[in-house]
Amino acid sequence: MSDNFQPETNNEQLSNFETLAIRTQTERTQFDEHSTPLYLTSSFIFQDAEDMRASFAEEKPKNLYSRFSNPNVTEFTDKIAKMEGAEAGYAFATGMAAIYSTFATLLNAGDHLVCRLLLEKKNTLLCVADHCLKTWDRINVIVAGKQPAPQWLNLEAAQQHCAAGMGIWHWAGTVAEGEEPDVVMACAGDVPTMETLAAVDLLRDYFPDLRIQVVNVVDLMALQTAEQHPHGLSDEAFDAIFTADKPVIFAFHGYPSLIHRLTYPRNNHGNFHVRGFMEEGTTTTPFDMTVMNELDRFHLAQEAIVRTPSLQGKADAVLDELAEKIAEHHRYVREHGEDLPEVRGWKWPSAQGDGDAPE
């Protein structure tokens, strides 16, 4: 034994990373096991009705269902919290579940929330970060990706877009001034924005006369009414963007239910068809992940066709072609281990008329 050895005599001396990783654990049962057993149960029992009531009211600490809490999960979160110096922690099965739970909790609390989902490479992120850093007494959540992405807006356009919270991207749509769109293609998030614009590119080729309005959302709170949140748009402004009665295909980098919750009081809520995370995924390619969750350009284009009244009975061949593209992708990615060349190499067409077309 080293002459420098000193026995650990108090909790402060025990609080090093390695010790906490080992010593933080669930209390032993009456069987005195050495390692924590696995609790393979979906639910837990209650002593009586009052015990159940108090447990569900969170008046006493107790496990209810394993999907909410379980001794094994509690041990895991306690270990992480101890090692990170936190008071408590929560564990989620997926990153998307963690993001959604954060949003839902903050929204229910009525806090100020700015949702940034990497709409483009840098300009919108810079504008959102600038806004958040200049605010106080509020909670701001920025969700940003790390992969290279197209830059859809120049800096001036990004500033205006972030200030409004959402807007129509006229350069991407086909609606002339004074006209009503046939369908609205909306998006929030980096991947949903890319896939929505790729879907619009397909629809423009298939149906040159189809009036498509492209809407991008950067601040989710703008979807709420002005009475619900200070960033919320008036009903008139909301209807001017999403229309009062046209189908809206909304691609979202999260759970679809959140968009439905935020837009529920709106006039056109019944026509919102949201595509988002469906808890589908594995180790695969980026585009294959979107296909698994039906958030890809082919599924979005199909959704737009099916939901647009003027295309009913006139687009069966196009729907079949899009279904074949999905099947072709499925075959290609499993044979080659990468996405189709037309997907990997896709770029927004350069000739889009006047305005703020991407670089």
Image (tube, helix red, strand yellow):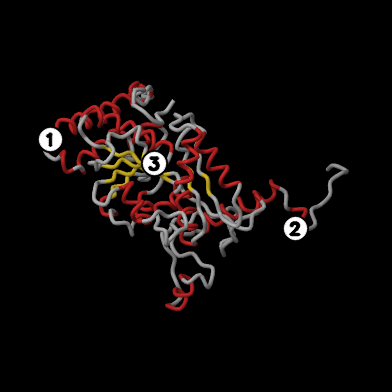
Mark 1 or mark 2: which comes first in sequence?
A: 2
Question: From the viewer's perspective, is 11 left or right of 147?
Answer: right
Name the spot of residue 299 as percent of width and height, x first.
Answer: 27, 37
State which mark lies toward you, 3 or 1.
3
Q: How many marks?
A: 3
Determine which residue is flagged by label 3: 216
Quarter of the rendering occupied by the C terminus: top left
Q: Mark 3 is on which residue type?
A: Asn
Q: Mark 2 is on which residue type?
A: Asn
Q: Mark 1 is on which residue type?
A: Lys
> Which image quarter: residue 1?
top right
Q: How packed is label 3: few (under 14 Cα within 10 Å), some, or many (20 or more)?
A: many
Determine which residue is flagged by label 2: 11
The kind of secondary structure element at disc 1 is: loop
Q: Nearer the viewer, residue 145 or 285?
A: 145
Mark 3 or mark 1: which comes first in sequence?
A: 3
Residue shown at 50%/43% (left/top)? Answer: 143
Determine which residue is flagged by label 1: 314
Name the spot of residue 54 as percent of width and height, x first.
Answer: 48, 74
In the displayed orientation, state which residue is furthest to the front. Answer: 178
> Which image quarter: residue 305?
top left
Where 6 falls versus 310 (above or below)? below
